[in-house]
Structures are given as C-alpha cells and as structure tokens.
Amino acid sequence: MTPFALVVGSASPHLGRALAQASGAAPVGVKMERFPDGELHIEVPPEEVRGRRVVLLQSSTPPVGEHLLELLLLADACWRAGAASMEAVVPYVGYARQDRRARAGEPLGGRLVADMLSHGRFSRVFTVDLHNPALEGCFGAPLEHLSALPLLADALRPHVTDTTVVVAPDLGAVKRAEALAKLLGRPWAVVHKARLSGNDVETLGLLGQVRGMRPILVDDMVSTGGTLAAAAKELKGEGCVDDFILATTHALLVGPALERLHGVPVKRLVSTDSVEHRQDLPFPHQVVTLAPLLLRALRPDAR
C-alpha cells in the first residue's frame, strides 16, 4: 500500500498526475458535480480513505474562493469517511498578498484564508513560496513552507552565460533574487518600484550594474505582469540586452498579463506547475514540476 491516499482538487490536475506518478499513489476517485444553482457536491469513496493518511492537493488559483471552498469540502468528506489524518498541499495560496492593511477599512485577507485552512482539520499544511513567509504565523496547523528556487535554478542553469544578471523587479523580491543569484553564481540587481493600484506600478530607480547584461527577472508570482513590464522598461533604459528570461514559481498570467508582456523581449518563461499553465503564450514556457519537492516533504522518512 502506498504511504498515503492522494486526493486531487480540480485546480491542480497536472501536478496531481505528476505527484501520483512520483509517489505511486493513484488519485482517489472523487466524484464532483454541481447543482443547478452552482452549489458544489462532492463524494469521496470511503473505502479509499478510511483509516488512512490522506494528502489533499489543491492550489487556490482563480477562482480563488471556489477552489478554497472545494478543498475544505474535500477535507470534510475525507474526515467524515474516517481518514486517520489529513494534510493539505496548497502550492499557491491566494490572498497571501493581503498580509497587511494599507489603510483603515481593508480586510486582512491573508489571515482570513489562513484561518479558513486552519479549520480544515489538517495535521499539516504545505505551501510553496508564499508571497510573504510571515503569513506562516497565522496558520493554526503546522505549516511547511517549501522553496522552488533550487528547481528553478536547475532549469535556468543551461541558459546562464557570463553576461547574465539576476534582477528583482521590486524590493519585495530582493531576497529571492539574491538567493537565485547565489545558486547560479551570478550578480544581482534590484528595481525600485512603487505600486499605484492593484494593476499599475511605476519604477523609481535601479540598484546594480546591468548595462550590456542579459537579465533573469525573478519573482514569486506573475499575476497581471505589471511589475515585470515596468521593471523591463527600466532595465532597457539602463542598457540591458533585449534577451529577458522570466523566472517565477506561480505563473498566474491573468488579466492584461499577455498584453503587457508582449512589449517585453521575453525569450523564455520558467515556472512551476503550482498553477495550470496556459497554452497560448507568445514565447517558450518551460514548466518545472513540483512533484519531487512535494514528495520529499511528504514521505514518512523525511519527517
């Protein structure tokens, strides 16, 4: 018998198949359907989870609320079917950017999502590259915060030259850029950004030497592409070569992302399968699976 029963939510089919293949755990045969009013109905075969350690895999990608609720419904179904223990693997945690209030009247969305997951009866929660690692303190269950940087570095290494520079597109990505630069043995730089709204940003300057260099722009996530587009404009103005690589854990690419990135000389996007990847990108997209990283964290002898 495999070390755990694997339950895969609808947000993570590709990663679910990769983790199943790596672990030898065939996904539990979950039945999902919707009532005419859109309400989700879930059935988990009791004989596949009763008395077993259950691992539930679900990224909280758009629609975030639907996928979070689905995860909690799956967990409740497994608990009521007699699961011995349950662990949640949430590679991408939605609302993690709302980890603080900028002004009165705003909710603390990151804390609220952490509270929701804490009510799922999970013995542990696994995440990958949280937007703000400090959110770990908000979880009621023990949280294991994993990093995909070594996987991304392995994928990027064949494209690194003696003119490569790793760039943080804003101050929030500095530690990530510094860590990736160390893994690749290359220098790093940072773009100073100011956010004007949820969709728009402006750059205020650059720290580091980039003239004549080929940048690898790295961030934990690419959502609408505004931060990367603004950073790329700043880098081009400072004399970077038109040969950009984007590296990210969570390639959401929503809203105007493709339109914005169309103006960036992107030669390659490297991301993980924490998010279901799009098929309509105008540039090569190399997807690195998180399955080995997750399996190392989940296997019994890794505890």
Image: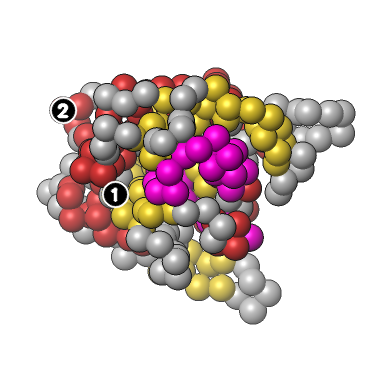
Q: Which residue is pictured at 58% across the width and 27% down the height? A: 206
Residue 89 visible in image: yes
Q: Residue 32, relative to residue 183: is it above or below?
A: below
Q: Residue 55, relative to residue 128: is it above or below?
A: below
Of badges 1 and 2, the one in the foreground is 1
Residue that label 2 marks = 301
Q: Which residue is pictured at 28% across the width and 49% down the height? A: 289
How many discs appear? 2
Q: Which residue is pictured at 61% across the width and 52% down the height? A: 224
248 in magenta: yes
User: Callout 2: few (<14), some (14-19), or many (20+) C-alpha neighbours within 10 Å?
Assistant: few
Tell me the element at label 1. strand
Which percent across, then down, holds residue 187? 37, 24
In magenta, the rendered stretch is: 229-257
Nearer to the camera, 255 or 133: 255
Of the image marks 1 and 2, the number of the one nearer the N terminus: 1
Q: Which residue is pictured at 18% across the width and 48% down the height? A: 23
Nearer to the camera, 38 or 294: 294
Which percent across, then down, holds residue 90? 44, 43
Residue that label 1 marks = 288
